[in-house]
Image (tube, rainbow, N blue to C red):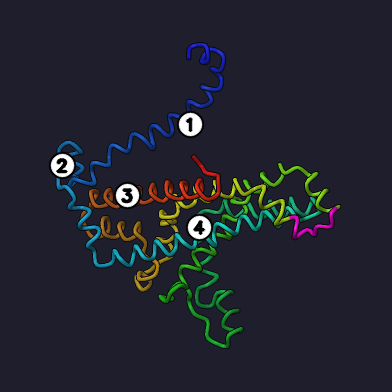
């Protein structure tokens, strides 16, 4: 160990800021998990707050709207790991089919830009485009012969879910395709040349060479996305939803936020219980999806 430190000390120095970041912001706060079992008060702290056992979980799960929030969370998560996950893969494969390198770089650059747009700005743009009198609302009204309406105020399934997912695709499709574009660039060009000589079309080369070669990367990213799917973009939902659409837009995160922080006194114990519940579910999804991919696809994240 000592010899390794002496030989690679530069690498350890570079790793130190990353280690401190995760230690301070990710591992030290895990001590706060105990708050989920307490009637936590800031003045009393963790060691002085009374122990209430599972009372916070009972209050969370027995809430009148918890079932609706859980349903919305599951449905939005399913859309994210299907439609939202597949979109960057398809985009990366289509980019690989472009022959003009200049055009390809231009498309890639333009697709990356929305990722750097703040959530507040992205939500404001969506509100303007699909609001009453917005360009998309007016266009849809003309195509269907109806009236322009505010689609974000529509409380019917699955209008809000689709709007939210499509906004996420627009914002992240370019950035999400980077890993797949990099994987495709490492594929041996001789494979494509041999397939072309044998008469394979570009579509056949895509399905027989490109996709199989990047499948390990797709599986790894899929496992990671499944693990994070339950924690949907609650910050964007907070900016988009309204009381009239709670039945289709409220997720476990936003439900807990309203229950714990907008009802008067701040209930840190309840919010900690909700966070712990979602972390446990995310861990189960991550381990489960990784186990299934290792068993049936012979590839896994760990």
From mark 3 to mark 2, how far is it between C-alphas? 19 Å
Q: Residues within 10 Å of mark 2 (few under 14, many from 20)?
A: some
Mark 2 or mark 4: which is in front?
Answer: 4
Residue matched to label 1: 18
Does the CB distance between marks 1 and 4 fall below 8 Å? no
Residue matched to label 3: 275
Of marks 2 and 4, which one's residue comes earlier in the chain? 2
Instruction: Answer with the quarter of the image where residue 189 lies.
Output: top right
Count of numbered tags: 4
Does the CB distance between marks 3 and 2 fall below 8 Å? no
From mark 1 to mark 3, how far is it between C-alphas? 24 Å
Of marks 1 and 3, which one's residue comes earlier in the chain? 1
The residue that appears at 62% across and 46% down in the rendered structure is 179
Instruction: Find residue 171 and report its horizontal and vertical position in percent.
Output: 57, 57
Q: Give the numbered dot on residue 49.
A: 2
Instruction: Find residue 178 and report its horizontal and vertical position in percent.
Output: 63, 47
Q: Residues within 10 Å of mark 3 (few under 14, many from 20)?
A: some
Residue matched to label 4: 81
**Label 4's element?**
helix
The residue that appears at 39% across and 32% down in the rendered structure is 23
With respect to residue 13, does 174 lie above or below?
below
Of marks 3 and 2, which one's residue comes earlier in the chain? 2
Residue at far front of view: 295
Q: Residues within 10 Å of mark 4 (few under 14, many from 20)?
A: some
From mark 4 to mark 3, how far is it between C-alphas? 21 Å
Which contiguous range is marked in magenta? 198-205
Mark 4 or mark 3: which is in front?
Answer: 4
Of marks 1 and 4, which one's residue comes earlier in the chain? 1
* Foreground pick, 10 / 288: 288
Q: Give the numbered dot on residue 160.
A: none
């Amino acid at each position: 160990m000592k010899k390794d430190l002496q030989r690679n000390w530069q690498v350890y120095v570079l790793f130190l800021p990353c280690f401190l970041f995760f230690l301070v912001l990710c591992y030290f706060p895990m001590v706060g998990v105990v708050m989920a079992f307490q009637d936590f008060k800031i003045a009393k702290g963790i060691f002085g707050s009374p122990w209430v056992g599972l009372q916070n979980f009972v209050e969370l799960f027995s809430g009148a709207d918890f079932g609706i929030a859980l349903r919305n969370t599951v449905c939005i998560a399913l859309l994210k790991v299907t439609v939202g996950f597949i979109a960057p893969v398809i985009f990366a494969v289509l980019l690989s089919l472009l022959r003009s390198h200049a055009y390809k770089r231009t498309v890639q650059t333009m697709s990356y830009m929305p990722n750097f747009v703040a959530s507040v700005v992205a939500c404001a743009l969506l509100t303007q485009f699909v609001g009453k009198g917005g360009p998309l609302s007016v266009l849809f009204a003309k195509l269907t012969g109806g009236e322009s309406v505010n689609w974000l105020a529509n409380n019917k399934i699955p209008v809000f879910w689709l709007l939210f997912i499509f906004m996420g695709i627009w914002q992240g499709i370019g950035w999400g395709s980077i890993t797949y574009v990099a994987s495709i660039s490492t594929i041996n060009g001789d494979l494509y040349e041999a397939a072309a000589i044998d008469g394979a079309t570009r579509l056949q080369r895509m399905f027989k060479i490109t996709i199989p070669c990047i499948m390990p990367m797709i599986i790894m990213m899929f496992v990671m996305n499944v693990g994070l799917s339950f924690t949907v973009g609650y910050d964007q939902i907070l900016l988009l939803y309204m009381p009239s659409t709670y039945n289709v837009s409220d997720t476990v995160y936003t439900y807990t936020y309203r229950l714990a922080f907008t009802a008067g006194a701040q209930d840190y114990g309840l919010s900690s219980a909700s966070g712990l519940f979602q972390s446990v579910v995310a861990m189960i999804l991550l381990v489960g999806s990784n186990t299934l991919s290792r068993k049936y696809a012979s590839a896994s994240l760990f």
